[in-house]
């Protein structure tokens, strides 16, 4: 049976080649996942959206996309609406359609190898088993993008890592998670400047 090709819409004022960088916040869609440690990337993307001037937004088949400006630079911000393990399915079409080089992409994601509350940038390298990153690397066939690693800490002894990241931040951790998301958003903005050659 013939399948109609899905049309990827241009956002208002965001023509291919217009945006200098793409920032991706990783997480799982749906209310049931919103408070999960695994959604630290989504939280940071939301914090980033509060720091920039959003010009337009729209829903692609696999994600929620925003066109924004910050400090004179145009950028795209993507929240994939696939599940984490299929993030590449959302990222690859956006990068291709809007002509974003891999070296001008920044991915915000949770990291159990970093203490809770810490934020560490990185460019390229391995994925440390993070399924969202693995999906993006596979889809792009390239791993030379920036990452903003958002620490959620190691799981307690006897707790499976997958169960841990899919559990909510504890009541006492919620405020720290919000502060960390703000820090990660600022790091992402600084990396946009680095990736695009705008160091202010």
Image (spheres, rainbow, N blue to C red):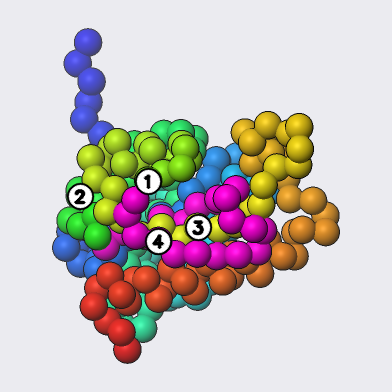
Give the number of the disc on residue 81: none
Q: Where does the image place residue 75, in percent across and percent down from the top left?
A: 32, 67
Residue under pointer 2: 97
Residue under pointer 1: 126
Circle 2: is it few (<14), some (14-19), or many (20+) Cα within 10 Å? some
- CA separation in Å, label 1 and label 3: 12 Å
- CA separation in Å, label 2 and label 1: 26 Å
Q: Where does the image place residue 141, in percent across and percent down from the top left?
A: 23, 40
As helix, strand or loop, the secondary structure at mark 3 comes to strand
Q: Residue at x 60, y 39 (%)?
A: 30
Circle 1: is it few (<14), some (14-19), or many (20+) Cα within 10 Å? few
Circle 4: is it few (<14), some (14-19), or many (20+) Cα within 10 Å? some
Residue 74 visible in this rendered orientation of the protein: no
* N-term-proximal mark, 2 vs 1: 2
Point out the stretch of residues depicted in magenta.
104-125
Residue under pointer 4: 122
**Quarter of the figure with the C terminus:** bottom left
- CA separation in Å, label 3 and label 2: 26 Å
Do the residues under discs 3 and 4 have CB atoms within 8 angstroms? Answer: yes
Give the number of the disc on residue 149: 3
Q: Is residue 127 left or right of residue 9?
A: right
């Amino acid at each position: 049976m013939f399948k109609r090709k899905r049309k990827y819409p241009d956002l208002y004022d965001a023509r291919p080649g217009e945006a200098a960088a793409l920032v991706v916040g990783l997480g799982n869609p749906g209310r049931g996942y919103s408070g999960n440690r695994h959604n630290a990337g989504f939280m940071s993307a939301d914090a980033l959206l509060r720091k920039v001037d959003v010009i337009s937004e729209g829903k692609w088949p696999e994600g929620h996309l925003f066109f924004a400006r910050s400090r004179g630079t145009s950028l795209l911000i993507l929240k994939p609406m696939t599940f984490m393990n299929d993030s590449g399915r959302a990222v690859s079409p956006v990068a291709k359609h809007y002509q974003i080089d891999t070296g001008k992409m920044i991915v915000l994601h949770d990291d159990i190898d970093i203490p809770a509350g810490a934020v560490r940038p990185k460019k390229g390298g391995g994925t440390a088993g993070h399924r969202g990153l693995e999906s993006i690397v596979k889809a792009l066939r390239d791993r030379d993008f920036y990452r903003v690693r958002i620490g959620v800490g190691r799981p307690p002894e006897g707790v499976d890592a997958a169960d841990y990241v899919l559990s909510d931040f504890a009541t006492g951790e919620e405020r720290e998670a919000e502060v960390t998301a703000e820090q990660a958003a600022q790091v992402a903005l600084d990396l946009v400047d680095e990736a695009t050659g705008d160091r202010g």
